[in-house]
Amino acid sequence: MSDKSEKTEQPRLSVFKTYKLYVGGKFPRSESGRVYEVTDAQGRWLANAPQSSRKDARDAVVAARKAFGGWAGATAYNRGQILYRVAEMLEGRRGQFAREVADAEGLSKSRAAAAVDATIDRWVWYAGWTDKIAQVVGGGNPVAGPYFNLSSPEPTGVVTVLAPQDSSFLGLVSVVAPVIATGNTAVVIASERSPLPALSLGEVLATSDLPGGVVNVLSGRTAEIAAPLASHQDVNAIDLAGADEALAKELEIAAADNLKRVLRPQPVDDWAATPGIDRMTAFLETKTVWHPTGSLGASGSSY
Amino acid sequence: MASAFEYAPAPESRSVVDIAPSYGLFIDGEFTEAADGRVFKTVSPSTEEVLSEIAQAGEADVDRAVKAARRAFGTWSALPGAERAKYLFRIARIIQERSRELAVLETLDNGKPIRETRDADLPLVAAHFFYYAGWADKLDHAGFGSAPKPLGVAGQVIPWNFPLLMLAWKIAPALATGNTVVLKPAETTPLSALFFADVCRQAGLPRGVVNILPGYGDTGAALVAHPDVNKVAFTGSTAVGKAIAKTVAGTRKKLTLELGGKGANIVFDDAPIDQAVEGIVNGIFFNQGQVCCAGSRLLVQESIQEELLDSLKRRLSTLRLGDPLDKNTDIGAINSEEQLTRITSLVEQGEAEGAERWSPACELPDAGYWFAPTLFTNVTQAHTVARDEIFGPVLSVLTFRTPDEAVAKANNTPYGLSAGVWTEKGSRILAVANKLRAGVVWSNTFNKFDPTSPFGGYKESGFGREGGRHGLEAYLDV
């Protein structure tokens, strides 16, 4: 018989989570070894989040570039399946994310749960877009001549996403999902004040069949991480959603050096409102492929 | 070059077009002097003859033109689309009626062969206005929402290589969507844009809807920077495009850029050689190679290199260089002395770096700016002539062994505007076209354009598309 006299009434001591970055399908700490304190809306300590350096940002670009060929080359059906799988994984973790979002944004339990539900539904919405966007924005052109030509959308490449500062999870997913649904890969800078839901999303993505490097999540000082990404020669586009006016201008100037596609900050009153397709088309190129039909060139002969 | 049949000269008459000794700026429906009275001369690049003296717009003129465009915007954008459409249809028709005049004028001012202005530029110009006219009353069906709005005043800066065609690409969609425009043509080719002002008057276009401001780079810079411009559209060099992108950073101006290119023309060993040779010639010697989407890098499969180059050289020997107004001329004049200097220096650099230069026997006229069609062989990817846009009749030849190598070499450039693929194998065309990072891929053809087809670049060749349904987006608040 064990000695029950030592049994205490102390509550169980919880296990804290060490939040880490999500880069190339792995969970590194910041190369800099720095962390910063993340607090809830009342200023209570929640965790120490990694404070990424420019080296972390560059590593993330390398991972995103490496993943681009495979992800862009995957069938749209396959991408849709994987995006839907993310929603499935999120569904099972609704409670966790509701708590994290409530802490991060100071929302009531019920409002945080509603935000998480809306976020999961948004993934599902974009999962359904992967194999439809080409039909909506591409097509055949009625050329005045013996040619057949087709315009098809293609992903722009590696996209840097400055996640919105205010909406730590719904806003985040609203800007990340459209980027990868169309075949781009992403380097995401989480909300500076509320990075934890974004870092936890990395854990979901890692277990959702999403190839490593397709989404890379960095936390830290937005302005510090964004600067090297805006001027990075191997980044093709930048979404400035999480930048204030001054930072957005500075980054847009830096982005001009290799003519990155820039999505300027758009005022969003309600992240829960149905998004249009603009966030997808902003990071798509249009390729037009021509071929003669029948006529065999200048000779005038034909099939 | 001895030939069994010599061609008799067949010059187009230049008397079909009247060129005034001087032209003003076109602001608010009137021709007017520049505020500071500055003028510049435009010359014919094939003869160096001064064609006319042109008012040079300064900052005050830009401001005046933007104000005129702003005043006109309210009523123009409020017109029912069907009425705007009718103005554009009128313009398309007047251009068709006057296309012979315009073709001669364009050839005189630009130096390109009349065969091209008459058979390529002008028909496309009219077609663009006709195409976008039809969109004006159908914008709610264009896929940009049920009531897409125009942006306001569009500031447009266009280059000298296709002066009137670039004007059409810019002005037709802008007007169809209800914007008003201030357009700056290039300093070496202002005449057809000023002629177009007269077309607008004949069409009865309301005052201020179209304003034309000839000038140099500083005029364009002032237009782009003007605080009351809502939309900036530029076609030209990548360097200037980057500067413009920096100027509009942090503003609400919408921007589209059509910039440089270093197009790869990929020829596989099963390609139809004769057609490929025609495509290569058309790809790089059309408009003296002064084309942003020119196929300036020939990637030929190693096993057919010799055969293809022999054919190509034979074909180049039959090209006729000379008077652009001669209907038999294939290669006209380089647009300006400045451009000729640039081409010459890049070609000399190519030789200095060890690439092998070849041109057919070719006599160049004494006056004017001329450059013989030129091939470079023994070119590696590191050579300047394989990397920099030359914007002249200069083709760099590289080789490859496998399709993957061809794709890797084709994509090995900061540009991404155009590419060509020549092979009889359908699956190979589709596979390669799929992997090429370029906005336009011509398979078994090259340099084809049509108003229904979006055109524009990946990477540092710019952003946005012109032409087709996609071309509307640049001028709508979406």
Image (tube, rainbow, N blue to C red):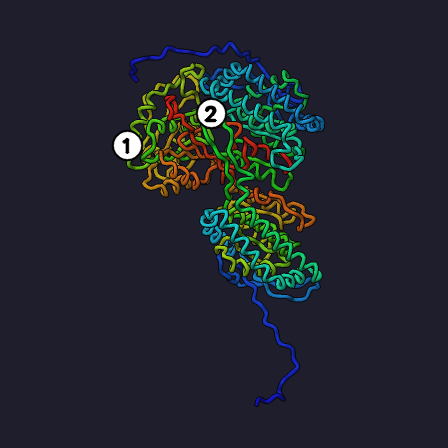
Residue at point 58% right, 17% down? Answer: B93
Residue beneath disc 2: A145
Which of B387/A46 is in front? A46
Residue A139 position, x and y percent, is: 52, 36
One can see residue B292 in this view? yes
Number of other residues with Cα within 10 Å of mark 1, as a class: few under 14, some 14 to 19, many 20 or more: few
Please give left or right for residue A129 compared with residue B267 in the image. Answer: right
Residue B343 position, x and y percent, is 42, 29
Q: Report which quarter residue B41 is drawn in.
A: top right
Mark number displayed over residue B200: none
Q: Is residue B3 above or below residue A229?
A: above
Q: Quadrant of the N terminus of chain B?
A: top left
- Give the Cα separation between the discs numbered 1 and 2: 33 Å
Point out residue A289 in the picture as x, y percentages from the top left corner.
Answer: 46, 34
Decide which of A275, B464 is in the foreground and name it: A275
| Dot 2 amino acid type | Gly
Is A179 displayed left or right of B377 in the figure? Answer: right
Q: In the rendered image of this protein, does residue A54 appear above or below residue B433?
A: below
- Horizontal arrangement in the rendering, residue B354 relative to residue B392 (left or right): left
Which chain contains the residue that carries disc 1?
B
Q: Nearer the viewer, residue B72 or A156?
A: A156
Question: Looking at the picture, does residue B92 appear above or below residue B298?
Answer: above
Quadrant containing the C terminus of chain B is: top right
Label 1 or label 2, whichever lies nearer to me, is 2
Tell me which amino acid carries mark 1.
Glu
Determine whether the residue tagged by mark 2 lies in a helix, strand or loop. Answer: loop
Q: Tag 2, which chain?
A: A
Q: Secondary structure at mark 1?
A: helix
The residue that disc 1 covers is: B306
**Figure quadrant of residue B404:** top left
Q: Name the residue: 51% across, 59% down.
A: A206
